[in-house]
Amino acid sequence: MFGNDSDLVDSLLGRLSSTFKIRDLGKPTFFLGIETLSEGGSFLLSQRRYMADVLSRAGMTDCKPLATPAAITQPATPTLDPFDNPTQYRRIVGALQYLTITRPDLSFSVNRLCQFMHSPTQDHWGLLKRVLRYVKGTLDYGLRLSPSSSSAIHAFSYSDWAGCTIDRKSTSGYAVFLGSNLISWLSRKQRSVARSSTEAEYKGLADVAAEVTWVVSLLRELGLHTGQPATLWCDNLGATYLAANPVFHARTKHVEIDFHFVRDKVSSGEFVVNFVSTKDQLADIFTKPLPAPRFHTLRDKLNVDIIHPCA
């Protein structure tokens, strides 16, 4: 239970304890594998014990760390040899899915691994080992939550058009911020093939619009919504214009109807869709492998921070 009025929190706990059998465990420390570390007025959510356990289960406790979880190059001749222990592959990938609760920088790589659960190959096992080697080098990293002077909602949406070389489907990603804190993120392959980059980006906008709608509904229920429209940032001018006015209607009839609810949100004043340059697009980290300098820059902007020694 959190609040900025300690007397009110104590009063509420007292009233709850008079009706229910409860026990106040004090400040949050360790819950469901997630450590809550207090550092200078902010919280850092860490799963370092869980990460160490995953590495132990994979037999990679002493592996050599890497700077990124995914390589930007692909093998010229991928092998189709099946991995001899698919159960182990599924078990470790499932464990990594839980790790993305506090590690958004792993979302794209883990999502890609999940796409081959049914029949992993030796190449897929190699991709998994690379992710584990990155985890090994970032055991002390976690998600930082800090006091913010703003409570405005803004989100970044990006899609890598036809990025999958197997089925040419696009990968969408988004990052939703409440003030300066990252509160929601996603990396997911789109369900259908997009015939243009604008369509791929517009599908991504639809996904983040649905998520922001839910966040706004939750904040209103808690009485914490400011009433200001949420800002969605997209680096595709076509999708940005289409969200405000269907000026390219003749060329976008193939876009499914349910994606057009973004325009309804914009016209009602709930959302504002703005253009952002690709170099400032934070959701880029959720759609494809990136070079180490770019990856580290975006990771820092997502508030994935290192635990200081004093913690």
Image (cartoon, helix red, strand yellow):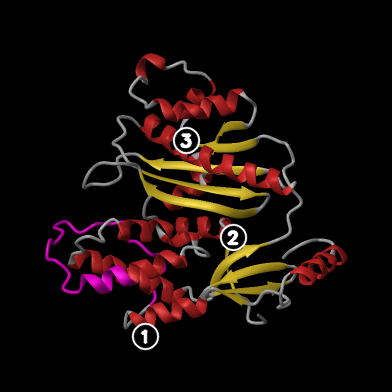
Q: Is residue 70 magenta?
A: yes
**Point 74% across, 47% down: residue:** 224
**Point 44% across, 39% down: residue:** 204
Q: Is residue 196 above or below residue 165?
A: above
In this view, the residue in front, 3 or 78, is 3
Residue carrying label 1: 62
**Point 46% across, 15% down: residue:** 247
Q: Which residues are magenta?
A: 65-91
Q: Position of residue 100 (x, y in %)?
A: 46, 63
In this view, the residue in front, 23 or 124, is 23
State the quadrant of the N terminus.
bottom right
Residue carrying label 2: 303
In this view, the residue in front, 140 or 254, is 254
In this view, the residue in front, 117 or 294, is 117
Would you call the spot at circle 2 few (<14 residues within 10 Å), some (14-19), or many (20 or more)? Answer: many
Q: Check contact, mark 3 vs mark 2: CB within 8 A.
A: no
Return the disc, 3 or 1, that comes first in the chain's sequence.
1
The amino acid pointed to by label 1 is Asp
Mark yes or no: residue 283 visible.
yes
Q: Is residue 206 above or below residue 166?
A: above
Q: Position of residue 83 (x, y in %)?
A: 17, 69
At mark 2, the secondary structure is loop
Residue carrying label 3: 206
